[in-house]
Image (tube, helix red, strand yellow):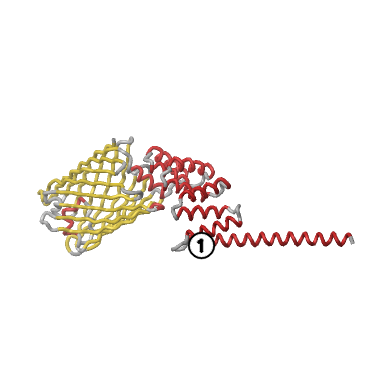
Amino acid sequence: MKNNFIHIAKLLFCLFLLFNQNLRAQKKIDTDSLLTVIVKDMKTNNPDYKLNIQRALLGKKLAPDYLDFHLVLGRNYDLIKVKDSARYYYNYVIAKNSGYEDAFLDLINLDIEEKKYDEGLILTNKAIELYPESKSFRLRRIAIYSLQNDSANEEKYLKSIRAKFPNDPEIEQRLYILYSKVNFDRIGVYYNITTIDRDEVGPWHLASADYVRQRLWGSLIGRVNYAKRLSSSSVMSSGLQFEAESYLFAKKNNYHYIDVAYSQDAAFPEWRLGYSYFHTFNKGWEADLGARYIEMQDKSNLKTLNVGIGKYFGSYWVNLRSYIQEDGTSFTLTSRYYYKTKYDYVTFIAGYGTSPDDRTRSAEYQTRISLRSYRLSAGFFKLVKSHYIFGILITDNEQEYVANKFQTELDFAFLMQYKF
């Protein structure tokens, strides 16, 4: 009788364990399913954030230790702009389990959005200690220094992350933009000679002197150009052109390019105006949209729409730009390899058609846009002793001058600048 009682007790205990495990398993399945519903809804085009919050609160009640519900609560509160609640749940997840990398990222992004840069920097440094191989946290630290206009630390950590993640396109793009914002001035001279293999045509000379003032807001460039074009050893045209260029940084990831040039001499158009809007994307992508206007000395004018797209591939930068006008479209493909700073690079350029940005041929732009041309360029530029910039660019332009007849134009360009 006693043995039967023991067997019955064991059987009841086993049934109780089995029933309890089934309840736990069912509860796990239900909470997992509920979390899946929330995450799936957040990925739709029209998520219901308030409903997701109610679902997550229910999930939190069913499984208080299931931190994923706290994380999605933070994200949904974040998305409906209830920032205090979002911050509470992000901090709760981090305090309970520092293994939630996404919670660190979400909270750092919230600090950046609310301009709590000091708090964001402390949290970012903590995350870097926990996740030393994560590029995301290092980039967040650099972004915070950039927003604080702390160029010294931004450059320091960009160089550090570049050493850890070499040939990363996003890092190279950030370095280029940073070097474009550092305060300094430059003065320089430029000279280009064009030889032409057709009898009694050329050579052409183009020389310029410029002054560049670069600040955090952008840059302003003043330039004076002088051109002299020879034909049969006589001066066909010569004269001066006065030019102003500017790169203006707007909101994050955007900047503008503006160019105005004026001349009263036949060696140049009377007016040359240009504008482009640039936007930088993630992973080293950049796009631009703009227009060019050229008014010749005879008051005829030409309008051009330009569209471009560029991409960093590690230390390489590649850009394709098209110039669309009524009489034809030209293309320019530019590639650069940066081996140190933004002033140290090797470049190769290929093009079809005449570009309105080609200063050497701007006086003949009106006659050339309906003619074919094919060009290749190669150049080398170097910064020496942190102050002196030297460059050379050689261009072979195969230019149609009448139907189906071409001339070879060779450009030899030299640049020297002093940076201070």
Residue at image x 50%, y 43%?
128
Q: Is residue 337 left or right of residue 54?
A: left
Residue at image x 32%, y 37%?
384
Rendered location of residue 394, percent (x, y): 26, 49
Rendered location of residue 191, percent (x, y): 21, 44
Rendered location of residue 20, percent (x, y): 70, 59
Q: Is residue 200 left or right of residue 322?
A: left
Where does the C terminus fall, quadrant-wise?
top left
Q: Amino acid at mark 1?
A: Lys
Q: Residue furthest right?
A: 1
Between 223 and 154, the one nearer to me in the picture = 154
Is residue 352 visible to us here? no
Task: Please give the residue where the numbered disc 1 appears in the rendered image.
Answer: 40
Q: How many marks?
A: 1
Is residue 342 visible to us here? yes
Between 111 and 311, the one nearer to me in the picture = 111
Between 4 and 239, the one nearer to me in the picture = 4
Rendered location of residue 398, percent (x, y): 23, 57
Residue 55's place in the image compared with 209, above or below, is below
Q: Secondary structure at mark 1?
A: helix
Q: Is residue 328 left or right of residue 132?
A: left
Q: Residues within 10 Å of mark 1 (few under 14, many from 20)?
A: few
